[in-house]
Image (spheres, grey):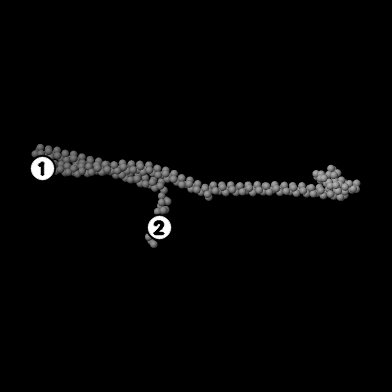
Amino acid sequence: MFKRFFTLFSAMMNSMMGKMENPEIMLEQTCLELNEQVQKVEQAVVQAMATEKQLQREMEKNKKESETWHQRATMAVQQGNDELARQALQRKQQYGTAAAELETQFKSQQEMTVRLRQQLTDLKSEVQKANTKKSVIVARHKAATATAKANEIMSKASSDGAMSTFERMEQKVSMLEAKSQAMSELSGDQVGKNFKNFEEQMDIEAELMALKGAAGGGPKLIVAQEAQPVPAKAAAASASLDDDTVDVEEVREG
């Protein structure tokens, strides 16, 4: 159980770390560490060169001292002072031994200095390559990030985004326009029907007034309408009416 939990926790942490790792930040930190290494190697090279020079000076000093005591031993021998010559030779031997040891250290230090300087040169070259590669990777990362954001925006604007909203609003406006046009057509038809009914009613009223006038209902003002042919029986009945009756044709003409 604990092992499964640990595995799950490790996977979650790795996922979180992967998301948190910014290539630009990580590469910048790596380059900073490389520059720090360069500085440390430079300090080591400087120290190695200083040690080399110091050993060289000590070696040359002991060699000179050895030669000096050799000359003194020679002078003592020339003067017949063997004891003083022996002491001078002992000093010569001491300085000579020291000079030999220093020369060995000096040569070893020289080799070390050469190696450190070569390492410094190689490290600086690697740092230069790393800086160039960092610039390329950072540029690629920025381009990839921008492309991903653009694709995300376009994806949102396709079906559920702004473009879908435009399409829905366009359909809504089209529906409103269609309803408005339908209502306008219906309203126009109703007006036409009203006018037709009005005309029919006027025709009926005119005919009614004509009939009332023909029946002796007294002079009436009848709305003029188009003359209609009068049947023969109606004409005969009209001729027999009293003189006070108003003729339908006269009313129409009036």
The answer to which image quadrant residue 136 occupies is top left
Q: Residue furthest left?
A: 80
Q: Mark 1 points at which residue?
A: 83
Residue type, mark 2 in image: Leu
Closer to us: 43 or 191: 191
The residue that appears at 83% across and 46% down in the rendered structure is 230
Q: Which residue lies furthest to the front in this view?
A: 232
Q: Where is residue 82 in the image (x, y as percent from the top left)?
A: 9, 41
Q: Position of residue 13 (x, y in %)?
A: 40, 55
Q: Where is residue 58 in the image (x, y as percent from the top left)?
A: 22, 42
- Would residue 67 be found to the left or right of residue 166 on screen? left
Is there any visible trace of residue 42 in the rendered image?
Answer: no
Please say if the residues under marks 1 and 2 sit with CB atoms less than 8 Å apart. Answer: no
User: Helix, strand or loop at disc 2?
Assistant: helix
The residue that appears at 40% across and 55% down in the rendered structure is 11
User: Helix, strand or loop at disc 1?
Assistant: helix
Q: Name the residue under label 2.
A: 8
Closer to us: 127 or 41: 127
